[in-house]
Image: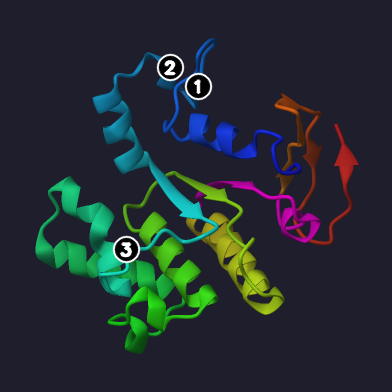
């Protein structure tokens, strides 16, 4: 959590293997990303990480279904398995089947973000990286997306790292790390929304 320009997106890009450090090391679990070649990073991202963006980054020429299926195309998965995984991800994300053929411009912001989450989830990654996932949504859609991310974390065991400057969104987290001018402040451990916050 932190204001604009504090380094949130840079940190997410380093954790997600999108950027490489000019100095130091980047470890995600037992994975030394700083030692990986670009090809190895590409494969690692495709199989271990899902990304959710503030502005969705959906391809306008593809349907909700096509956007969700896209990450599977490079993994050599059969068409029948792609259909099964894509349908499961869209169902998890709460997008009714009647919208699966819609293009992004035919969907609301909240529906587009559900597609974004389905796309991030479809490869069954261990880690979801969410960069301001509710920053472009109205209050109702924001809360629905935060509840969905909470479900993905609690019921599917996915680790979620979310950047936000919104205290309400941060209230859904179990741990808050504050960034100021690129520096990490002590973490705040909490039990989720409306729980008592304790410093450790």
Dot 2 corresponds to which residue?
A: 34
> Height in image: 116 above or below 1?
below
Dot 1 corresponds to which residue?
A: 27
Q: Residues within 10 Å of mark 2 (few under 14, many from 20)?
A: some
SS at circle 2: helix
* Residues shaded magenta: 157-173
Judge left or right: residue 43 versus residue 138. Answer: left
The N terminus lies in quadrant: top right
Q: Residues within 10 Å of mark 1 (few under 14, many from 20)?
A: few
Q: Is residue 87 visible?
A: no
C-beta proximity under 8 Å, tags 3 and 1: no
- Between the residue at mark 3 and the residue at mark 1, the CA separation in whole angstroms equals 31 Å
Name the front one of labels 3 and 1: 3
Front residue (pair 84, 103): 103
Where is residue 164 drawn, in percent x and y?
68, 50
Where is residue 121 drawn, in percent x and y?
40, 57
> Height in image: 166 above or below 96?
above
Name the front one of labels 2 and 1: 2
- Between the residue at mark 2 and the residue at mark 3, the CA separation in whole angstroms equals 30 Å
The residue at 30%/65% (across/down) is 67
First in sequence, mark 2 or 1: give its number.
Answer: 1
The C terminus lies in quadrant: top right
Judge left or right: residue 3 versus residue 23. Answer: right
Residue situated furthest bottom in the rendering: 98
The residue at 69%/37% (across/down) is 5
Dot 3 corresponds to which residue?
A: 59
Q: Is residue 121 magenta?
A: no
Q: In which quarter of the image is residue 186?
A: top right
Q: Does the magenta stretch include residue 171?
A: yes
């Amino acid at each position: 959590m932190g204001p604009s320009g504090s380094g949130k997106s840079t940190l997410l890009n380093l954790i997600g293997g999108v950027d490489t450090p000019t100095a130091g090391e980047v470890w995600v679990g037992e994975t030394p990303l700083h030692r990986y070649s670009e090809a190895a990073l590409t494969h690692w991202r495709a199989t271990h990480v899902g990304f959710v963006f503030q502005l969705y980054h959906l391809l306008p020429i593809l349907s909700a279904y096509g956007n969700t299926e896209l990450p599977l195309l490079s993994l050599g998965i059969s068409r029948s398995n792609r259909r099964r995984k894509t349908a499961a991800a869209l169902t998890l994300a709460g997008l009714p089947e009647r919208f699966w053929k819609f293009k992004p411009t035919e969907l609301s912001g909240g529906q587009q973000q559900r597609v974004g989450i389905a796309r991030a989830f479809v490869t069954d990654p261990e880690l979801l990286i969410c960069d301001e996932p509710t920053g472009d949504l109205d209050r109702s859609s924001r809360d629905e997306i935060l509840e969905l991310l909470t479900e993905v974390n609690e019921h599917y065991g996915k680790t979620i790292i979310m950047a936000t400057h919104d205290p309400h969104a941060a209230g859904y987290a179990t741990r808050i790390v504050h960034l100021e001018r690129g520096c990490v402040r002590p973490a705040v451990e909490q039990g989720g929304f409306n729980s008592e916050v304790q410093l450790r």
